[in-house]
Amino acid sequence: MAKYLLLKHYRGAPAAVNDVPMDQWTPDEVDAHIRYMRDFAARLEGTGEFVDGQALSPEGTFVRYDGEGRPPVTDGPFAETKDLIAGWMVIDVETYERALELAGELSAAPGAGGKPIHEWLEVRPFYGVQSTATE
């Protein structure tokens, strides 16, 4: 088994087919999306392929070490928060192909109008795991 991180982005990835930002969805559309994500995770728990996952707020702070006794630096030339990670899921699967299959399925989560988002997901193996990606 190999672990992969599936990353959902607020922006920065190619545009989704159903590219309506979540803050413009109705409450029912948001609920349907979250339900899809939870059902997907529950199904993978049943197969032993789900490790963990969380949705993330678009707000965040950058912090770095700036020397002993110095305060962290929290401003600078950083990416817009809208370009950052919207959420993540860690899966533990037998093959890279299975990771791609699950990412493709997760991409079909409903969005505006109840239609699949067809969003791009970033699939990243944990460090030290050799993927068989063909580019």
Image: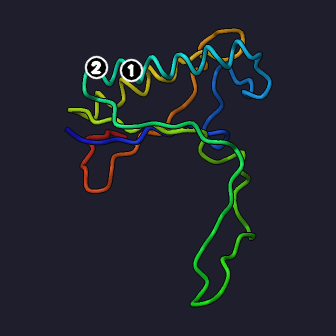
Q: Position of residue 7 (x, y in %)?
A: 50, 40
Amino acid bearing label 2: Gly
Residue, x 66% and y 77% (percent of image)? 72
Query: How far across and down, in percent of the image, does residue 19 sit?
Result: 70, 24
User: What mark, if any, has residue 10 been given in the picture?
Assistant: none
- Helix, strand or loop at disc 2? helix
Classify 113 as above or below 123: above
Nearer to the camera, 131 or 26: 26
Residue drawn at the location 47% of the way across and 23% of the way down: 106
Task: Check whether the beta carbons of the residues at disc 1 and disc 2 lie within 8 A of each other.
Answer: yes
Amino acid type assigned to the residue bearing label 1 in the image: Ala
Residue neighbourhood size for the residue with mark 2, other residues' Cα within 10 Å, grouped as few (<14), some (14–19), many (≥20): few
- Residue matched to label 1: 42
Q: Position of residue 82 (x, y in %)?
A: 72, 45
Q: Residue furthest front?
A: 69
Residue sitting at x 25%, y 21%: 47
Please report the residue visible at 66 percent of the width from the left and 42 percent of the height from the top. 57
Residue located beneath label 2 in the image: 46
Q: Please provide percent x and percent y for residue 105.
A: 44, 19
